[in-house]
Image (cartoon, helix red, strand yellow):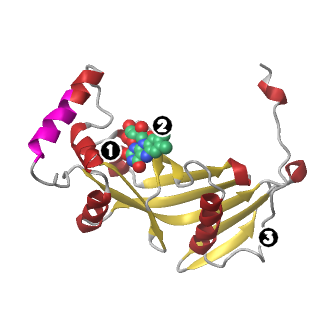
Amino acid sequence: MDISSLRNEYKHSALSMHSVHKNPVQQFESWLDDAIDSEIQEPTAMAVSTVGKSGFPQSRIVLLKYLDNNGFVFFTNFESQKGKALGANPATGLLFFWPELERQVRVEGIAEKTSRDFAEKYFRSRPVSSQIGAWASEQSQTIPSRSYLEDRFSEFSLKYKNQTPPLPDFWGGYRVKPIKIEFWQGRESRLHDRILYEKIENDWKIQRLAP
Ligand SMILES: Cc1cc2nc3c(=O)[nH]c(=O)nc-3n(C[C@H](O)[C@H](O)[C@H](O)COP(=O)(O)O)c2cc1C
């Protein structure tokens, strides 16, 4: 298949310096609402990029679970590849792509762990099988087989049969505090709209970028 000839014209909507919110978090919430309303399958999915000790950027999809003026929160295993990378270097990139809306949002920020209470509240809200799954999975480690993982799941299911699984020490949330947020809206003839918010002390400077 000749993929070089695949292309779309983007006509869905437009973005201007005057139409956007002064606060990028409010702007993001409004776009996230649009994404949820448009019934995209995973509207909260985002690529999280880290640069750990290897110096190579590493990206993976995780789900955004909370958002406020303090940042974008996701949950994971602190001993995973991303957890180790963030321990060495908290600089983080986040990327949302909502193709149905012809939109992309790019975030640069600094990740820090959420409080344990905050993580615990979210952990408790998950199905018990997911709580057991967090215990069973030594995330990002090499394992000998699928059955090794399933056996661990059975062991922890048995262990916590009559009690609520506790929050593992190695599991919790990261909050990415943004310093830059860029909104991209596809437009015709590749003249896309790009609006960048940059944090300068306590204010957000808003600029238009060439596509
Ligand atoms: C749609 C989707 C949602 C995901 N959500 C999460 C998540 O919220 N937390 C998480 O740790 N991994 C999530 N994953 C798995 C990650 O992409 C990744 O495989 C895992 O976190 C290990 O990454 P690492 O080895 O780079 O640390 C998700 C994957 C997909 C495709």
**Earlier-in-chain disc, 3 versus 1:** 3
x then y, percent, for residue 89: 39, 51
Mark 2–mark 3 Cα distance, whole angstroms, equals 35 Å
Does the magenta segment cover residue 156? yes
User: For the residue carrying disc 1, how many other residues have a C-alpha within 10 Å: few (<14), some (14-19), or many (20+)?
Assistant: some
Give coordinates of residue 110: x percent, y percent. 44, 60
Quadrant of res 153: top left
Q: Is residue 149 left or right of residue 208?
A: left
Q: How far apart are marks 1 and 2 (CA)?
A: 13 Å
Q: Which amino acid does label 1 sit on?
A: Lys
Residue 90 appears in view: yes
SS at circle 2: loop
Task: Identify the residue under disc 3.
Answer: 16
Disc 3/disc 1 C-alpha distance (Å): 39 Å
Look at mark 1 in the image and give the residue it sits on. 84
Residue at image point 30% right, 46% down: 130
- For numbered disc 1, what is the local secondary structure? helix
The secondary element bearing badge 3 is classed as loop
Q: Give the range drawn in magenta.
A: 151-161
Tell me which label, 1 or 2, sits earlier in the chain: 2
